Structures are given as C-alpha cells and as structure tokens.
Image: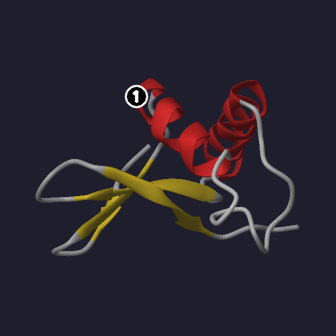
C-alpha cells in the first residue's frame, strides 16, 4: 500500500511497531473519554488488524499517522465506511 503524506505527516499502513503506542493510547481514560471504554492490548491489536484488513481489501480506511520528521506514530486518520 502506498503512503499518502504532507510535508509534516504520513498516512500509512499499520506496522507491528505501532501496537504498543496504539494500545497505550487506548488504555488512557482521557483519550477514550468520548469514544468508549478502555481497550486491552489484545483488543487494540485486533482493531489494528481490522484497520489493516480494510486498507488491504478496499484501498481506503483508517491509516496509521506518523510524523514525517521523527517517524513517531501519533494515532490514526482516514475514511470509515461505517
């Protein structure tokens, strides 16, 4: 899958290295305050698999978001058909 980017950010497929920071975000009560209950590591990992499956299957969905300059994973963005 190709990456989509700006000068500052890159939207890309999910990587194994995204799992730990993604799970930490979803275990944070402030992050999950308006979007639902906290997720376990296993639940967060399952979401990543589903997000990547959608990207592979449809060519769009929810991409991992990375800071171009540092390579830091900072969350996700994209299009959700639900």
Residue that appears at 37% across and 49% down:
2
Relative vertical location of residue 82 with respect to residue 56 in this rendering, above or below = below
- Residue lying furthest left in this view? 69
Residue that appears at 44% across and 31% down:
15
Relative vertical location of residue 17 with respect to residue 62 in this rendering, above or below = above
Residue that appears at 53% across and 55% down:
63
Picture quadrant of residue 47: top right
51 left or right of 68 in image = right
Picture quadrant of residue 68: bottom left
Relative vertical location of residue 16 with respect to residue 11 in this rendering, above or below = above
Point out the image quarter for the C terminus: bottom right
Relative vertical location of residue 53 with respect to residue 77 in this rendering, above or below = above
In this view, the residue in front, 51 or 40, is 40
- Residue lying furthest front in this view? 29
User: Label 1, on which residue?
Assistant: 17
Tag 1, which secondary structure?
helix
Residue that appears at 67% across and 45% down:
27
Residue 8: x percent and y percent? Answer: 20, 72
Residue 62: x percent and y percent? Answer: 62, 58
Picture quadrant of residue 57: top right
In this view, the residue in front, 19 or 57, is 19
- How was the colour assigned to the protein in this rendering? secondary structure
7 left or right of 6 in image = left
Point out the image quarter for the N terminus: top left
Residue 54: x percent and y percent? Answer: 71, 46
61 left or right of 50 in image = left
């Amino acid at each position: 899958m190709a990456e989509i980017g700006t000068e500052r950010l890159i939207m890309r497929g999910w990587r194994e290295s995204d799992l730990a920071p993604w799970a930490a975000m979803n275990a944070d009560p402030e992050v999950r305050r308006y979007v639902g209950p906290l997720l376990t590591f296993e639940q967060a990992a399952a979401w990543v698999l589903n997000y990547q499956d959608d990207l592979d299957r449809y060519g769009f969905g929810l991409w991992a978001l990375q800071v171009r300059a540092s390579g830091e994973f900072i969350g996700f963005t994209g299009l959700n058909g639900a």
